[in-house]
């Protein structure tokens, strides 16, 4: 498993996005911000709110219900809910002309299940991004099936990298754990901000002040982690005076039944659900 190299976003043909909700929309934003010609982006999403559809059109992105309207797509990106895959996969299949690569971001839906609904021999990449992709700060785990060419892998890499870092996986089975760590992970961090604010209220702070303190603390710690060469452990130790206040808090959080055990259970539950969604 290696981090991929940086490559320019040169699709060499239209990119069809099926499902432009939170994740698909974040990816599309990344492609456009990364310089993708809007004329090369097409969206299929019958459920898009009118204002979202109008915003796409005003950016020059076509809403395309008809596969015949798109000549030789380079990639078809599938970003509907896993529960909608039976409806959306035939739509994707209709756009999958020879040479196109399907990139799926669906949690739990295996490449074998995707391939079974596509033209024989279709190239499939299974990916698990996360919502910080909306600001180019996401991280994606991706797996390319055997039929994906080097050029198609490079295109998928460039499309996913528009949302941040990409880690290519040698084993599709790792995607369930990737989902538990980074796919779902932003929610854990947002929950930390919520829980810290609630704890502040319980400790006597006004709610709005507690929310501001908690939010800025999560933001600041995340940014420090980003900019510092130090490990999370060293940064944690830097906060912790011997026998001080942080040590008192960490004796709770790092107890045997503390955050480590809780996080392990949470990630295992997400990975288990990902395997369940695979059916
Ligand atoms: N939201 C997240 O943090 C992440 C989501 N994912 C995956 O991304 C996928 C989408 O999730 P969200 O964006 O959160 O959901 P969402 O509900 O925001 O977006 C799904 C979109 O698909 C559209 N859609 C439904 N049926 C369709 C069809 N037959 N044809 C075309 N479009 C159709 C809906 O109108 C909607 O706009 C899921 O499979 C999820 O597992 C992956 C990583 C992170
Ligand atoms: O909750 C979910 O199922 C999706 C996949 C990872 C993040 N959101």
Image (cartoon, rainbow, N blue to C red):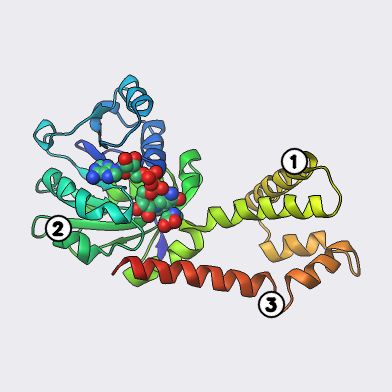
Res. 258 in view: yes
Query: First in sequence: mark 3 or mark 1?
Result: 1
**Looking at this view, is 236 or 3 the one in front?**
236
Is label 1 in contact with label 2 (beta carbons under 8 Å)?
no
**Looking at this view, is 151 or 109 the one in front?**
109
Q: Quadrant of residue 72?
A: top left
Q: Which residue bears the numbered disc 2?
A: 117
User: Residue 19 in the image: x percent, y percent?
Assistant: 30, 42
How much space separates mark 1 and mark 2, taking CA atoms? Answer: 48 Å
Q: Quadrant of residue 235?
A: bottom right
- Give me the residue at 38% from left, 66% from top: 274
How much space separates mark 3 and mark 2, taking CA atoms? Answer: 44 Å
User: Residue 2 in the image: x percent, y percent?
Assistant: 41, 63
- Give me the residue at 89% from left, 69% from top: 242
Query: First in sequence: mark 1 or mark 2?
Result: 2
Classify mark 1: residues with Cα within 10 Å, few (<14), some (14-19) or many (20+): few
Location of ligand 2 given as a quarter of the image = bottom left
How much space separates mark 3 and mark 1, taking CA atoms? Answer: 29 Å
**Looking at this view, is 120 or 22 the one in front?**
22
Q: Quadrant of the C terminus?
A: bottom left
SS class of the residue under badge 2?
loop
User: Residue 238 in the image: x percent, y percent?
Assistant: 80, 60
Classify mark 2: residues with Cα within 10 Å, few (<14), some (14-19) or many (20+): some
Q: Is residue 70 left or right of residue 152?
A: left
Q: Which residue bears the numbered disc 1?
A: 212
Q: Which residue bears the numbered disc 3?
A: 257
Does the residue tagged 3 have its C-beta within 8 Å of any atom of ligand 2?
Answer: no
Q: Quadrant of the N terminus?
A: bottom left
**Looking at this view, is 157 or 87 the one in front?**
87
Q: Quadrant of residue 128?
A: bottom left
- Give me the residue at 17% from left, 34% from top: 65
Q: Is residue 107 left or right of residue 77?
A: right
């Amino acid at each position: 498993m290696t981090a991929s190299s940086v490559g320019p976003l040169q699709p060499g043909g239209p990119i069809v996005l099926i499902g432009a909700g939170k994740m698909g929309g974040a990816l599309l934003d990344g492609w456009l911000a990364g310089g993708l010609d809007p004329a090369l982006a097409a969206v299929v999403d019958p459920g898009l709110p009118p204002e979202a559809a109008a915003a796409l059109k005003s950016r020059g992105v076509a809403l395309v219900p008809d596969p015949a309207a798109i000549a030789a797509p380079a990639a078809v990106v599938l970003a509907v809910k896993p529960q909608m895959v039976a409806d959306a996969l035939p739509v994707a299949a209709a756009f999958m002309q020879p040479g196109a690569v399907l990139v799926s971001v669906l949690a739990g839906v295996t490449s074998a299940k995707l391939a079974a609904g596509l033209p024989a021999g279709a190239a499939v990449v299974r990916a698990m991004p996360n919502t910080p992709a909306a600001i180019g700060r996401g991280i994606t785990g991706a797996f390319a099936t055997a039929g994906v060419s080097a050029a198609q892998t490079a295109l998928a890499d460039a499309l996913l990298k528009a949302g941040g870092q990409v880690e290519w996986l040698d084993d599709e089975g790792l995607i369930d754990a990737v989902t538990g760590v980074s796919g779902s992970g932003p929610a854990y961090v947002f929950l930390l901000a919520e829980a810290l604010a609630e704890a502040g209220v319980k400790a006597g702070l006004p709610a709005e002040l507690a929310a501001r303190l908690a939010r800025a603390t999560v933001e600041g710690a995340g940014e420090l982690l980003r900019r510092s060469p130090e490990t999370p452990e060293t940064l944690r130790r830097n906060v912790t005076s011997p026998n001080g206040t942080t040590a008192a808090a960490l004796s709770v959080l790092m107890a045997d039944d503390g955050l480590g055990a809780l996080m392990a259970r949470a990630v295992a539950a997400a990975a288990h659900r990902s395997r369940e969604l695979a059916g």
